[in-house]
Each structure stands twice: as structure tokens, then as C-alpha cells.
């Protein structure tokens, strides 16, 4: 699309693919990108996973989580994960063995034992804790839960207050994944404006913005992040803290995106179609928005995807150190803060499970971003 | 060469100034100022402070001056080695920071050396034997290494050590050497403790370096001069090490610039988890108790450390590659 004859240069990457040359010649850019992307297996799997998290889990956490994540339970502090039994006497009836807890007389540690006689049966679409679906619809249906709403099950164990880790992990997914998205969206706004200005005007503007980018990317980020978030007053309410943290993260996150945007701007600035638009008398913003930006969408989407994991990791690190999000907000970092101490981890290793969620989502976003980047320019 | 170094040195000065402004901005950020915290601390200990003392303290730190003047006062102190007072430790900041900063430097430098020593051969192998099993293994670990934040890796390692061997890992010294004066025995003790932080901090950067080395070398290996040398009968390994690797090494050194800030950042968090006597735990503590002069000194010095590290890497690069010198 940018230069030369796309048709001749597009044929080679698809040789041996299921599309014959005739199809490739008439396919649009989006189709070509999709064909190229599809060949990256890991990226496809990651795309499915990321979409599932963002579209199915994040908006509906109350539905997926069986219990209220804040509800403490004095009987089950540090209860270990329960085993799920799918069949009861040959019949499909998922259940767990109810825990009996006693205090070990020698060590004074609380010990939990599953009692095979007392089964807690599970059901799908049970009525339990009421909530507002998407903040609008009043309902009390949860995806699954114990038949008897008085019973408790601990798939992933319980924390020190006996709160259900499974429900907490699901709620944490909403905050951690969304902070990545919101933070990147903010960085993108900064990045496009500053990178665009830098690449389009060149000269002094470019120089100043480039120095700023260089400076920001040469500073160690964590001390700066810590310093900035330590200044958030303790009295602020959680929502404000959430937005402040997002702003702090994107304040140091925009340089990479700006660099990508600037690079693209510079490389297509002197392309024939831009020059002809200019000769036709199109004004500057029309050239930037109408002609230049569309040819960069794919690159920008790829860079944005690759920037989300950084945000997620940064939030996790900040909250883990106690300077990021604070309870009652639940994020993966806030959950991991409970696992700061080796002895606690040794006593309740399931507190580390949120780390798994962090690693899986970061890997998925990285693979997806890699695949998108490779597919971003299907004419190569 | 001298000209290049001088130009590069001159370029460092404005950067350092900006770092100091950022550090001072952070010092100034929390509500209330140093004296407020100091006085409430004294009052908590039942030490009465009268209005005159407060006024003289405020005057001494110039807390009622406008921001630029306070910055200049603070900076002129910093230049003379006076970073202000830590109200929490009731000591001048400069007595608290140097040993910790030194240890941070030691850990960071050893990690970079470790990363190089491991990443170089693996990167070369991955490129030369592209798509071999070894290459796939390296790529896989590269991805995983990049995805696991190093403080989680530290936590997992500590858990495994505790569970499997009953060891409590952490710290840089055995209890008997903590706070002891520097002796050979203490240095050896430190080296024995250092491998865990080095591995934890090194994995992320190592994964990145292996991928960079692999990509660079692959580019070089397909160039005609390699074919020419091969056609002339040069032994394969000698050829690879003598020409393409040398060219591919170039970006390798310039990546120190990228790795150093990440490394210093990572070290801050990891050292909290592993309770290393480096800058991390004290910085965190200072920020939590709003001991801002101490925190600001750390932020300033960590920033300076990175900038000087990048300066060194640029000079090394210029030594290695004449094209850069004559630009």
C-alpha cells in the first residue's frame, strides 16, 4: 500500500499457503494481515486467551466468582485448596469433601482435613450473593457454587482471613488486566501526539522530544514510579488511587510508543501518496489523520499489545511493594503482597497462584504482540 | 576519540541536571514538608520543640523559600556531599547511603558480567545452529525468562530453597558478618551469597541479550563476506568468531544502555524480597515513612549511576567501532 507494487511483492510470503496467487492479488490489507497472522500458532492461541479474558472475564467477574472476595471466614484461615471430585457413585455430580479443622496439639498449627462423609455438592448457575451485572442489572446468579449457599469451597485455598482465593483471583483479573489497558491507552495518547509532532515537524521540536524520550528511557523506572506513587495521600479513595497509578505508569510508558510513531512518520513522510496529498493542497492535519495514520494502525496495535505486559508487571510490582494499589482494591499485585514473606509462602504456597496468572497473561500478550508485529506489514 | 569522549561528557551534564530536578520534584511532592514530619517525630518521642527551634530549623533548610531557591540550596548541598537529614534515622543522609549504593553497584556489575558470559555463547550457538533443539530450548527459556518478573522469580526460588532444603536464603552476608568491618572473610562471605541475586536479576536481561545476539548474528551470517571467507577455506569456527561475531557484538554493548536501567529497577524490588543490604529496602522504607531527603538522595544517585553506566557503554562502543567515533 505504501510503496511500489504491492501485488508482486506480496506473492512470495504466501507461496505454499492455501491461497493461490489470484486470491492474494485481490485480497485487501486486512485480509493479508489476517492470513499472515494465522500462521503464527502461538499468537492465535494467545489471541483467544486474551480476548476471553478481556471480553468474558473482566466485565463479568461477579458472575464467575462464587463468593464475595472480601468476606472473611474465621473457620478457614489458610485453608489449602480442595480437590474437586467429578463423580459420585458413577454419576456426574461434582463435589468437594467438606473441611474439618482442628488445631494440632504439638505445633498449634491449624490442620484441615477433607471428610469424605460430608460432601459439598456443586451446581452451575446457583443463586447466591446478589450483585449488579455490568453495574446495571440486579441479579444473584453465579456461574457455579455450592448447592447450599451456607457452605464454602476453596478451589485455590484461602488467605490469612479465610477469604476465598479463587474469587479474589478473578476479581484481581479485572483490575490488573484493565490497568494494563487503560495505562496503555493513556500512553498511546501521549505517544501519538508527541511522536507525531516529533516525526512530522522535525527540527527543534523533534530534538526536544527526542531528548525527553532518551532521558525517560535511560532512567531506572522503579525508583521513579515508587517516588511518584509514594506521594499519593493515604486518605484518597481507591478509585482515585487507581487512576493516579495508571497516570504514573503511563507517564513513563509513552516514550516507546512515541518512538514507534515517530519512526513510522519519518519513513512514510516522503512516500509518493503523502507528497501527492500535499500537492493536492490537503492541510496538515488531514494528511496526518486521513493519510498517514491509517497506514500505521497495524504497527501501533502491535506496539500497544507489546506495551500492555509492561504495565501489568509494573502495577504488580508497585502493589507488591505496598506503594501501588491498596486494599480494598484487589489486583494480582495486592494478592501477591500477602505472599511477601517466605514463611507465609511455605505455610500457604497457594498464595503464589496469582503469580501464575501474571506470567500466563504476560506471555500471552507477548506472543500476541509478536504475531501482530510480524503480520503488521503483510507486503514484506 | 578524545573529542568524542569530551562531547559525550558535555552531553552528560544537562542530563544530570534534569535527573536532579526530577529527584527534587519527588522530594517536594508529598504534602507537608520535612520539618513537619521531623517535629511530629520528636513530639511522638516526648521531646518538646518550641516555636523558636522550629523557626530556626525552617530557616536552616530554607523551607519557606520558593521552589527554585530551595532546589538551588539543596543542589549546592549535594555538590558538597550534604544530602540533608534523614529524620527517621536522625543522621545525615550521606552516612546512610554510600555502603548500600556501593553494594548495589557490585550486584549490578556482577549481574551484567554474568549475563554476558552466559548470553554470548548461547546466542552464538542459537544463531549458528538455527532451528536446532538447542536453539528452540534457548528461545523457549528466553520467552519465559522475559515473562517472569524477577521479584516473583526470587520469591519462587526462596520458596523452593525453604521447602526442599530448609534454607532461608536472602541477604548478602551471614549473620556474623552483618555490619562487620570489611575483611577478606567478609568479601568471600558476600560472594557466597551473591549468586542468588545475580541469577534472579540476570535472567530477564540474559533472555533479551540471547535474542539480540541471535538476530544480529543471523543477519551477519548471510552476508557475502562470510561466503567468501568460507570459499577461501577458512575453518568454520575461526571464521565465525573472527568476523560476524565481532560485528554482531556491537549492538550487544550498546544494549547495556537498555539493560542497566531495567537492572537497577529490578534490583530495587528484588533486594526488598531477598532483603539485600542494598538501596532497595531503605529506599522503600524511606518512601513509606516519607523520609524524603533520604529517598530523594537514592533516586538521584540511582539515576546518576545509570547515566554514568551508559556513558561507559558509549565510550566502550566507540573504542570498538571506529564508525561511531567519526560521526
Image (cartoon, rainbow, N blue to C red):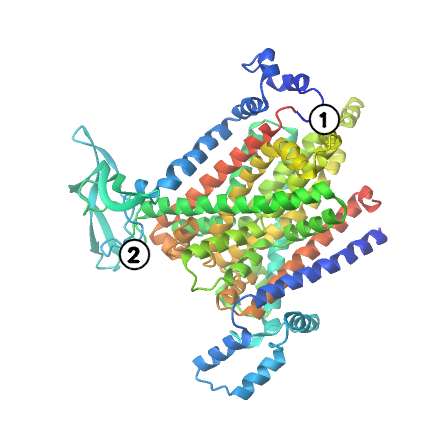
Q: Quadrant of the N terminus of chain A?
A: top right
Residue that label 1 marks: B222
Q: Are marks 1 and 2 on the same chain?
A: no
Residue drawn at (62%, 66%) of the image: B24
Query: The residue marked by circle 1 belongs to what chain?
Result: B
Residue B134 placement (x, y as % from top left): 57, 31
Residue drawn at (51%, 88%) of the image: B50
Q: Nearer the viewer, residue A292 or B46?
A: A292
Residue that label 2 marks: A161
Looking at the rendered structure, the secondary structure element under dot 2 is loop
The image shows residue A297, relative to residue A152, as above or below, that is above
Looking at the rendered structure, the secondary structure element under dot 1 is loop
Residue drawn at (60%, 59%) of the image: B104
The image shows residue B28, relative to residue B166, as above or below, that is below
Residue drawn at (66%, 63%) of the image: B20
Q: Is residue A295 left or right of residue A73?
A: right
Q: Is residue B45 left or right of residue B136?
A: left
Of the residues tagged 1 and 2, which is closer to the observer? 2
Q: Is residue A93 left or right of residue B205?
A: left
Q: What is the distance, in whole Å, between disc 1 and disc 2 at their CAs?
A: 61 Å
Residue B46 shows up from this direction: yes
Q: Quadrant of residue B305?
A: bottom right
Residue A361: give its label. Answer: none
Q: Farthest residue to the front: give it.
A: A281
Amino acid at each position: 500500500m505504501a510503496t511500489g507494487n504491492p501485488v508482486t511483492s506480496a506473492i512470495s510470503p504466501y507461496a505454499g499457503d492455501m491461497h493461490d496467487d489470484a486470491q492474494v492479488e485481490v485480497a485487501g490489507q486486512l485480509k493479508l494481515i489476517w492470513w499472515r497472522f494465522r500462521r503464527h500458532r502461538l499468537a492465535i492461541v494467545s489471541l483467544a486467551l486474551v480476548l476471553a479474558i478481556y471480553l468474558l472475564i473482566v466485565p463479568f467477574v461477579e458472575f464467575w466468582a462464587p463468593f464475595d472476595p472480601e468476606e472473611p471466614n474465621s473457620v478457614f484461615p489458610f485453608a489449602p485448596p480442595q480437590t474437586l471430585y467429578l463423580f459420585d457413585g458413577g454419576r456426574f455430580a461434582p463435589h468437594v469433601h467438606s473441611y474439618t479443622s482442628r488445631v494440632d496439639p504439638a505445633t498449634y498449627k491449624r490442620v484441615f482435613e477433607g471428610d469424605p462423609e460430608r460432601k459439598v455438592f456443586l451446581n452451575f448457575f446457583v443463586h447466591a450473593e446478589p450483585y449488579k451485572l455490568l453495574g446495571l442489572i440486579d441479579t444473584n446468579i453465579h456461574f457455579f457454587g455450592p448447592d447450599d449457599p451456607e457452605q464454602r469451597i476453596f478451589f485455590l485455598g484461602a488467605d490469612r482471613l479465610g477469604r476465598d482465593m479463587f474469587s479474589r483471583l478473578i476479581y484481581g483479573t479485572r483490575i490488573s488486566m484493565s490497568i494494563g489497558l487503560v495505562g496503555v491507552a493513556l500512553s498511546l495518547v501521549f505517544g501519538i501526539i508527541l511522536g507525531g509532532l516529533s516525526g512530522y515537524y522535525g527540527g527543534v521540536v523533534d530534538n526536544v522530544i527526542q531528548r525527553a524520550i532518551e532521558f525517560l528511557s535511560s532512567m531506572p523506572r522503579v525508583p521513579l514510579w515508587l517516588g511518584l506513587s509514594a506521594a499519593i495521600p493515604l486518605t484518597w479513595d481507591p478509585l482515585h488511587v487507581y487512576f493516579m497509578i495508571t497516570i504514573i505508569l503511563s507517564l513513563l510508558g509513552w516514550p516507546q510508543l512515541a518512538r514507534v510513531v515517530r519512526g513510522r512518520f519519518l519513513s512514510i513522510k516522503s512516500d509518493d501518496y503523502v507528497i501527492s496529498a500535499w500537492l493536492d493542497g490537503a492541510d496538515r492535519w488531514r494528511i496526518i489523520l486521513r493519510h498517514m495514520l491509517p497506514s500505521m494502525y497495524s504497527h501501533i496495535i502491535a506496539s500497544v499489545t507489546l506495551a500492555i505486559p509492561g504495565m501489568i508487571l509494573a502495577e504488580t510490582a508497585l502493589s507488591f511493594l505496598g506503594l501501588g494499589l491498596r486494599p480494598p482494591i484487589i489486583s494480582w499485585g495486592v494478592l501477591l503482597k500477602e505472599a511477601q514473606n517466605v514463611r507465609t509462602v511455605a505455610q500457604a504456597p497457594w498464595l503464589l497462584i496469582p503469580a501464575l496468572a501474571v506470567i500466563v497473561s504476560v506471555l500471552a500478550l507477548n506472543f500476541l504482540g509478536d504475531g501482530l508485529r510480524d503480520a503488521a506489514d503483510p507486503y514484506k | 576519540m578524545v573529542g568524542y569522549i569530551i562531547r559525550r561528557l558535555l552531553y552528560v551534564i544537562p542530563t544530570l541536571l534534569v535527573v536532579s530536578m526530577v529527584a527534587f520534584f519527588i522530594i517536594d511532592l508529598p504534602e507537608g514538608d520535612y520539618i513537619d514530619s521531623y517535629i511530629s517525630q520528636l513530639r511522638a518521642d516526648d521531646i518538646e520543640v518550641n516555636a523558636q527551634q522550629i523557626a530556626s530549623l525552617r530557616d536552616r533548610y530554607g523551607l519557606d523559600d520558593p521552589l527554585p531557591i530551595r532546589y538551588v540550596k539543596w543542589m549546592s548541598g549535594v555538590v558538597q556531599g550534604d544530602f540533608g537529614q534523614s529524620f527517621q534515622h536522625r543522621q545525615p543522609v550521606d552516612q546512610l547511603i554510600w555502603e548500600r549504593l556501593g553494594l548495589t553497584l557490585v550486584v549490578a556489575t556482577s549481574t551484567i558480567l554474568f549475563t554476558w558470559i552466559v548470553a554470548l555463547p548461547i546466542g552464538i550457538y542459537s544463531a549458528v545452529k538455527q532451528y536446532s533443539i538447542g536453539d528452540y530450548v534457548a528461545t523457549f527459556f528466553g520467552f519465559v525468562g522475559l515473562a517472569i518478573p524477577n521479584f516473583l522469580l526470587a520469591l519462587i526460588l526462596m520458596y523452593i530453597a525453604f521447602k526442599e532444603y530448609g534454607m532461608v536464603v536472602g541477604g548478602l552476608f551471614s549473620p556474623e558478618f552483618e555490619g562487620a568491618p570489611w575483611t577478606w572473610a567478609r568479601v568471600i562471605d558476600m560472594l557466597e551469597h551473591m549468586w542468588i541475586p545475580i541469577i534472579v536479576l540476570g535472567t530477564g536481561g540474559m533472555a533479551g541479550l540471547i535474542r539480540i545476539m541471535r538476530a544480529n548474528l543471523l543477519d551477519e551470517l548471510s552476508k557475502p563476506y562470510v561466503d567468501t571467507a568460507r570459499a577461501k577455506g577458512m575453518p568454520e569456527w575461526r571464521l565465525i568468531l573472527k568476523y560476524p561475531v565481532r560485528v554482531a557484538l556491537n549492538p550487544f554493548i550498546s544494549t547495556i544502555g537498555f539493560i542497566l536501567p531495567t537492572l537497577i529497577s529490578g534490583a530495587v524490588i528484588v533486594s526488598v524480597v531477598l532483603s539485600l543490604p542494598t538501596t532497595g529496602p531503605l529506599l522503600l522504607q524511606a518512601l513509606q515513612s516519607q523520609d524524603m531527603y533520604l529517598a530523594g538522595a537514592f533516586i538521584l544517585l540511582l539515576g546518576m549511576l545509570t547515566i554514568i553506566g551508559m556513558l561507559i557503554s558509549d565510550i566502550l562502543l566507540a573504542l570498538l567501532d571506529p564508525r561511531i567515533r567519526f560521526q
